[in-house]
Image: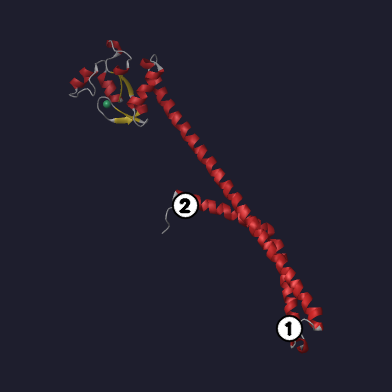
């Protein structure tokens, strides 16, 4: 069964991929050079071993480290030296390739980490902008209420903070139902038409049903009529 990858595993996966790409890019850039050097080395090895096999018996009998025979000094030794040179060239090229690959891997890692940090900053900014937009929407909602238009901005901000815990829903002052903030009605506990004010203590949010049923009653009259009790002693 395939397990879902965690955030950390995704990060490690993409980081390893970036490093691998850095390595293989360098390798493909040097592939031809390495192949060429390897070809030269293989040819030199073949030539040397062919010559070794063809060595006359009289020369062979001199012992392995004795190069005084004509065949060994004129034929075998130069071929042996060619093979050593080819071997060294190939080994140096491979060492250079490994060093370059390590460099490329490091650069790829740094690039990946920088891009990741940039993405995090962008996500943070996006979230901040979204939170700001939600806040402005709530403020606009309250500003659209004719009764509140004259109230001060700080009063509106206090109302939002006081009446909504999560910024998305409020609890109806009368029936205690949770409703989206956009569907709530601004409530004057004592109606403006009966001497109520825009003071904070006189303001509440309610659901549409309760607001319409309440009409011109004060909140005490309304709650008494429906058998409830006020949530606060205003
Ligand atoms: Zn209600």
Q: Is residue 144 left or right of residue 82?
A: left
Between 40 and 79, the one nearer to me in the picture: 79
**Image quarter of residue 221:** top left
Label disc, if present, on residue 53 of the rendered structure: 1
- Answer with mark 1 or mark 2, whichever residue precedes in sequence: 2
How would you rate the neighbour count of disc 2 (Cα within 10 Å): few for under 14, some for 14-19, many for 20 or more? few
Residue 96 location, x and y as percent? 67, 59
Count of numbered circles on the image? 2
Is the C-beta separation of discs 1 and 2 under 8 Å?
A: no
Please report the residue visible at 58 percent of the width from the left and 47 percent of the height from the top.
110
Quadrant location of ligand 1? top left
Q: Is residue 209 left or right of residue 88?
A: left
The image quarter in which residue 192 lies:
top left
- Image quarter where the C terminus lies is top left
Per the model, the C-alpha gap separating discs 1 and 2 is 57 Å
**Where does label 2 land, which residue?**
9
Residue 227 is left or right of residue 53, and the answer is left
Label 2 sits on a secondary structure element that is: helix
Residue 12 seen anywhere in this rendered image of the structure: yes
Image position, residue 42 (x, y; %) = 71, 72
Residue at the image point whose x is 47% and y is 52% from the top: 9
Quadrant containing the N terminus is bottom left
At 69% from the left edge and 63% from the top edge, which residue is drawn?
92
- Residue 20 disc label: none
Q: Is mark 2 within 8 Å of ligand 1?
A: no
Residue at 62% across, 53% down: 104
Considering only vertical position in the picture, is 135 above or below 234? below
Please tell me how crowded label 1 is: few (under 14), some (14-19), or many (20+) other residues with Cα within 10 Å: few
């Amino acid at each position: 069964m395939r397990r879902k990858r965690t955030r950390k595993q995704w990060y490690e996966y993409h980081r390893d991929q970036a490093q691998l790409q850095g390595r293989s890019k360098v390798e493909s850039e040097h592939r031809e050079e390495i192949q060429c050097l390897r070809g030269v080395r293989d040819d030199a090895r073949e030539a040397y071993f062919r010559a070794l096999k063809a060595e006359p018996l009289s020369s062979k009998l001199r012992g392995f480290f004795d190069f005084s025979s004509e065949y060994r000094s004129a034929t075998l030794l130069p071929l042996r030296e060619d093979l050593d040179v080819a071997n060294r060239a190939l080994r140096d090229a491979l060492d250079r390739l490994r060093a370059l690959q390590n460099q490329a891997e490091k650069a790829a890692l740094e690039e990946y980490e920088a891009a990741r940090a940039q993405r995090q900053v962008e996500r943070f900014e996006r979230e901040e902008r979204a939170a700001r937009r939600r806040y402005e929407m709530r403020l606009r909602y309250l500003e659209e209420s004719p009764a509140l238009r004259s109230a001060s901005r700080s009063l509106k901000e206090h109302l939002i903070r006081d009446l909504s815990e999560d910024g998305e829903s409020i609890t109806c002052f009368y029936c205690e139902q949770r409703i989206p903030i956009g569907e709530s009605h601004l409530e004057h506990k004592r109606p403006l038409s009966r001497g109520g004010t825009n003071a904070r203590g006189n303001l509440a949010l309610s659901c549409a049903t309760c607001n319409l049923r309440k009409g011109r009653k004060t909140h005490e009259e309304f709650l008494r009529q429906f058998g409830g009790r006020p949530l606060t002693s205003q």
